Amino acid sequence: MAVTLRDVARAAGVSAATASRALSAPDLVSPERRELVRRVARELGYRPNRAARELITGRSGHLCLVVPDLENPFFSAVAKAVQARARAAGHAVVVADAEEDPRLEAELVAQLGAQADGVLLCSPRMSSDDLAAVAADGRPVLLVNREGADLPSVVVDNRDGLRQAVRHLHALGHRRIAYAGGPAGSWSDARRRDGLAALDLDLEVLDLGAHAPVFAGGVGAADLAVASGATAVLTYNDLMALGVLDRLRTRGVRVPQDVSVVGFDDAPVATLVTPSLTTVAVPLARLGRTAVDLLLTPHDDDAPHTVLPVELVVRGTTAPPPRPPETR
Amino acid sequence: MAVTLRDVARAAGVSAATASRALSAPDLVSPERRELVRRVARELGYRPNRAARELITGRSGHLCLVVPDLENPFFSAVAKAVQARARAAGHAVVVADAEEDPRLEAELVAQLGAQADGVLLCSPRMSSDDLAAVAADGRPVLLVNREGADLPSVVVDNRDGLRQAVRHLHALGHRRIAYAGGPAGSWSDARRRDGLAALDLDLEVLDLGAHAPVFAGGVGAADLAVASGATAVLTYNDLMALGVLDRLRTRGVRVPQDVSVVGFDDAPVATLVTPSLTTVAVPLARLGRTAVDLLLTPHDDDAPHTVLPVELVVRGTTAPPPRPPETR
DNA sequence: TTGTATGCGTTATCAA
DNA sequence: TTGATAACGCATACAA
């Protein structure tokens, strides 16, 4: 059996209440006894029983993190940061993989979230209505990479990211740019399309439609891009950009000489290829850290909506278009 | 406040004990009452309080998974599978990132593992002695991708994997092969070197030393490989292989025409590059699933040591060496 | 400042 | 088959 608080109390010659206070509310105990209890606790290897503590305080010391796909480098980067920050704040992290399934997502939140001190919902695929339902459950919920249902959230500036990417391409001389979008209904994809629409530059933007946010999705989009006659391709994320790169190479299209490619996220895979990927860097770790901080910080009434900046990282996949831009 | 068992009992007109049994030990309750209680519970949206249950049963419904680096695709793949399998078995997963630090690793196990039903230690970097200490803690521990301290474990056949890779290269005609090893002290690295040593083929094996199991480690190893005059390079994992690939390309060495490269793991990144990587495929998902099953299945006394098979996947980075093999 | 007593929600024990 | 009751380990209201 594990060492219990009563064991510590007995060994220190005090009551259980005093032992409890010495550890959880040091100010309420005389210095000598406090030190005595803490020393004894350390010597005995005492570890408070989380279940017992939760039962009375209502706090479990657990955060719940739900992501669409743990294997996606975007989410594993966020998960890593979340875990680290939560630990620093004395919380363990229960992670759940929703397998890109909105239904499972909702169920996981209901199931796991109920016994957690808070839920971090990362890039949820569920509808705003379902989001609202989740929110009504009582537990604090924080949205990562999505806004909606009046829930507190932390996101990145998607519009600006796309703007930066397009500006860069425009400056290089590109005038026909294709955008290979992410999953239909994706919140961040919609934001990026906003950024695309709001531009006031003399260029043509081709919409390549919606694609799975993975390598294979990019492969498919590449053919559309070639057919469109665009000199540059923007993708929803880096995984797709790598798919585009791969497919273009297979088809004998040189990057960046014939076509430029720009990704999004600067996920850890962006530098795994040659030339390495020009991409819009998202502060993944900061996203995770901020999410934990926001979730753990009580906010009175109005939900905080944090927007983190993004930054274009120019690497090897962008260059001027093959022919000089036409003068108008 | 959440719906409690007493609420259900009251609404159903039975005692709390009966309500409890109706849900957790259905056989002990008369069919009519059982159904009544279950219906009422469903209607009220009752969810058992894990903390209260844990307090009395000693089981938390949590598994603890400790990995060296969540961002490493090897571990995120295992984590994904572990999570899925654990969920199917009614367990939540608390994941901890040890940041490749043996000290932190041990602390995490002690801290998080104490309140879990079992601990999955994935590729632990700690010494066998520390492993033994962890094991003594009482909680069931299962080693993934490592053996030691008489703990139950699930690993892959590293020796055979290396053997397959070398056979493949030998068959292609390679006679000078370099091995770029992983972290010094790595258990699986040692097993692979065993496989290397046990070969009975007419070829020279060059040891390129120990490297960080990441892209950058491979970059460094590539230069050593070139200097060694080897016609083929084996790496500790796929991340390193990609680093080798990148560096070779930068230096104008063609793959596979001038040098062949073989990775290990078949992590999701292996097909992100062109040509895609020839590698020893490790059943990552199966590793995770098996780990959960083994941890949850009580084994009387002697610890199970499961070894999973691996399989060479030949893709684009291997070909015959530039010059025909010398005849001896 | 300290100790006593109580209760958190559930399961286990025992008697009916 | 059921119900009353105790117990899990801890934090807190209250009394001292």
Image (cartoon, coloured by chain):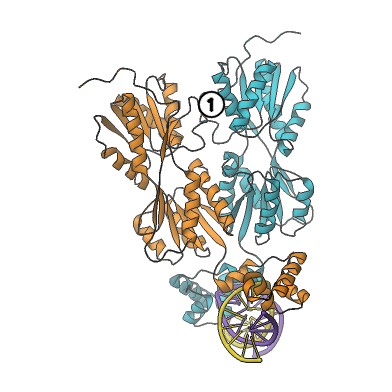
Chain colours: A cyan, B orange, C yellow, D purple
The residue to which callout 1 is attached is A276
The structure residue drawn at horizontal position 58% and vertical position 47%, both measured from the top left corner, is A79
Q: Nearer the viewer, residue B81 or A192?
A: B81
How many numbered marks are there? 1
Q: Is residue A68 rendered to the left or right of residue B277?
A: right
Q: Which amino acid is tagged 1? A: Ser
Residue A242: x %, y % from top left: 57, 28
The structure residue drawn at horizontal position 38% and vertical position 60%, both measured from the top left corner, is B303
Quarter of the rendering containing residue A235: top right
The structure residue drawn at horizontal position 55% and vertical position 15%, both measured from the top left corner, is A252
Residue A2: x %, y % from top left: 48, 72
The structure residue drawn at horizontal position 34% and vertical position 28%, both measured from the top left corner, is B169
Quarter of the rendering containing residue B278: top left
Residue A237: x %, y % from top left: 63, 32
Residue A55: x %, y % from top left: 64, 71
Q: Residues within 10 Å of mark 1 (few under 14, many from 20)?
A: some
Q: Is residue A19 above or below residue A123?
A: below
Q: Is residue B81 visible?
A: yes
**Can you say which quadrant of the picture contains the C terminus of chain A?**
top right
Q: Is residue A223 rendered to the left or right of residue B237?
A: right
Q: Is residue B13 above or below residue B83?
A: below
